[in-house]
């Protein structure tokens, strides 16, 4: 799991460095990074694609507008990933310098899990519906606290891949409950906002990536609405 914990941070820093100014990434940008991560695109390919996109931008005779979204780099990121695949340099999934994932102590992970459990327990969530978001969140909070206790008492370090799978399953259940409890008009409004943000960049992304990006965008907005944490270890 190359650069497992710093995938998001390194992409953000690379984009800001090449842009030349600090620009806070938008919901669309963070969702796009997730689509790359979920698709298994190596960090090295993402960074290379960002460089290529900005190099092409710099070579343009007229640059009246700055690059304001990572979506501008989407086509080059996909191209870089394909080039790496075709060149059979899968070893780059360990990172350009061969660095290893950041080593987190069990106590750090346990504290992260407990913080998220507390946020889930205190969130003002709907209780009705076929799938009650409040019930799902309460169950997830209990599971997180149990996992934290297990980590602290284990004689050997936890397998982070297994833990991440469990956290992902909890997130998916929570997203499903939130989606079911959210009025259709609100969902339509969020999707329309995503479409507006995506409009200038649709030509740079394939259809499956656009669909995944819209899904991620909706999930992020739901979390922001209810002030819920991301459970994944990526957000430690």
Image (tube, rainbow, N blue to C red):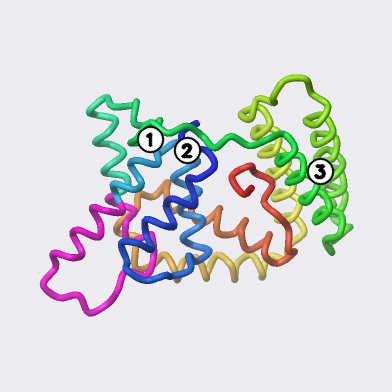
Which residue lies at the image location 84% right of the left edge and 64% below the top edge?
Answer: 124
Q: Which residues are magenta?
A: 50-76
Residue highlighted by disc 3: 140
Mark 3: which secondary structure? helix
* Res 63 → quadrant: bottom left
Secondary structure of the residue carrying numbered label 1: loop
Cβ–Cβ under 8 Å for marks 2 and 1? yes
Q: Is residue 59 magenta?
A: yes
Closer to the camera, 69 or 5?
A: 5
Identify the residue under disc 1. 95
- Closer to the chain start, of discs 1 and 3, is 1
Distance between the alpha carbons at the discs numbered 3 and 2: 27 Å
**Structural distance between the alpha carbons of marks 1 and 3:** 33 Å
Q: Residue at x 73, y 58 (%)?
A: 228
**Label whose residue precedes the other's in the sequence (3 or 2):** 2
Residue carrying label 2: 3
Image height of 205 relative to 100, above or below = below
- Callout 2: 10 Å neighbours few (<14), some, many (20+)? some
- Magenta-span inclusion, residue 178: no
């Amino acid at each position: 799991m190359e650069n497992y914990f710093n995938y998001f941070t390194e992409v953000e820093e690379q984009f800001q460095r090449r842009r030349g100014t600090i620009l806070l990434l938008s919901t669309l940008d963070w969702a796009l990074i997730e689509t790359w991560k979920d698709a298994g695109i190596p960090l090295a390919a993402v960074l290379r694609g960002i460089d290529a996109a900005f190099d092409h931008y710099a070579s343009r005779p007229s640059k009246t507008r700055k690059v304001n979204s990572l979506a501008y780099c989407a086509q080059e990121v996909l191209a870089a990933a394909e080039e790496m695949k075709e060149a059979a340099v899968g070893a780059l999934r360990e990172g350009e310098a061969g660095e290893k994932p950041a080593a987190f102590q069990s106590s750090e992970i346990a504290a992260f899990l407990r913080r998220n459990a507390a946020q889930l327990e205190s969130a003002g969530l709907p209780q009705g519906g076929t799938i009650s978001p409040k019930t799902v969140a309460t169950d997830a909070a209990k599971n997180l606290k149990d996992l934290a206790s297990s980590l602290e008492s284990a004689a050997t370090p936890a397998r982070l891949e297994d833990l991440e799978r469990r956290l992902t399953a909890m997130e998916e259940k929570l997203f499903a409950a939130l989606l079911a409890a959210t009025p259709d008009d609100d969902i339509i409004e969020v999707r329309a906002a995503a479409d507006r943000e995506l409009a200038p960049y649709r030509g740079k992304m394939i259809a499956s990536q656009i669909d995944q990006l819209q899904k991620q965008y909706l999930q992020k907005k739901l979390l922001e609405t209810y002030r819920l944490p991301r459970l994944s270890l990526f957000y430690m």
